[in-house]
Image (cartoon, grey):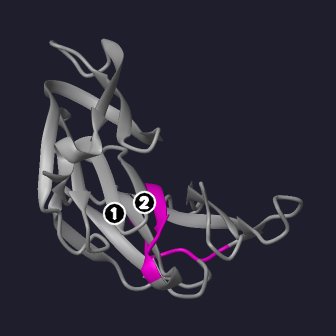
Amino acid sequence: GIQTRSGRLLIPCDHIVEVTKESYSHVIYSDDGGATWKIGGQPEAGMNECQIVELGGGALMLNMRNAAKKHTRAVSRSRDGGLNWSPLEWDAALVEPICQASLIAEGKDLYFSNPASTRREKMTVKHSSDGGKTWKTSRELHAGPAAYSCLSPVGKRDLGCLYECGEAGPYERIVFARFAKRWLTA
């Protein structure tokens, strides 16, 4: 989850409607430091395993695993703190094998990691300096089988990516890669 500049705590979540079996991404939020929580809005059906970042100007972006099997990440934006979300957009630059991904924001920079393929392989980290409109640079961390990942800042100059990978299958080991941001932004 994240804490916005206004102080709101936001946790990206997903759920399945019992009757219809449709999956949705949504957020829960707290405006009192986590003492109480409320359910925010949800984009349209077919999404799950989402990540959230705050963009410039306070807008939020939800980046979602596409359970509808389109092999691209879905994106939705909110300008009211996560209560309402824009219609889904498909980010053709973020190819996916229907897999969890990681997204973090540091100032104007966004960093994204996932298996950048229609199969669970090619663990890749991407960088955007324009709020996710374009992903100008990317670096492959592991060419073979790979699955879930989690990005994190490591000090002021580095990032870390914890991810599943292997040689014969994506779940053989968990690896932590540390790299300089400039390696990705150069």
Q: Position of residue 21 (x, y in %)?
A: 50, 58
Residue sitting at the far right: 35
* In the image, residue 51 lies in the stretch drawn in magenta: yes
Q: Position of residue 118 (x, y in %)?
A: 13, 45
Give the Cα separation between the discs numbered 2 and 1: 6 Å
Q: Which residue is mark 1?
A: 109
* In the image, residue 162 lies in the stretch drawn in magenta: no
Question: In the rendered view, would you say 83 is above or below 147?
Answer: below
**Residue stretch rendered in magenta on the structure:** 40-56
Residue at the location (47% across, 64% down)?
A: 53
> Residue 79, which numbered label?
none
Left or right: residue 68 versus residue 37 is left
How many other residues sit within 10 Å of disc 1, few (<14), some (14-19) or many (≥20)?
Answer: some
Question: In the rendered view, would you say 118 is above or below 63?
Answer: above
Circle 2: element type: strand
Indicate the amino acid at tag 2.
Ala
Left or right: residue 128 versus residue 159 is left
Left or right: residue 20 versus residue 73 is right
Residue at the location (23% across, 56% down)?
A: 127
Q: Are marks 2 and 1 in contact (CB under 8 Å)?
A: yes
Camera sees residue 133 = yes
Indicate the amino acid at tag 1.
Asp
How many other residues sit within 10 Å of disc 2, few (<14), some (14-19) or many (≥20)?
Answer: many
Q: Which residue is mark 2?
A: 105
Q: Position of residue 90 (x, y in %)?
A: 23, 71
Q: Position of residue 66 (x, y in %)?
A: 32, 58
The image quadrant that residue 173 belongs to is top left
The image quadrant that residue 99 belongs to is top left
Residue at the location (42% across, 85% down)?
A: 86
Circle 1: element type: strand
Camera sees residue 119 = no
Q: How many marks?
A: 2
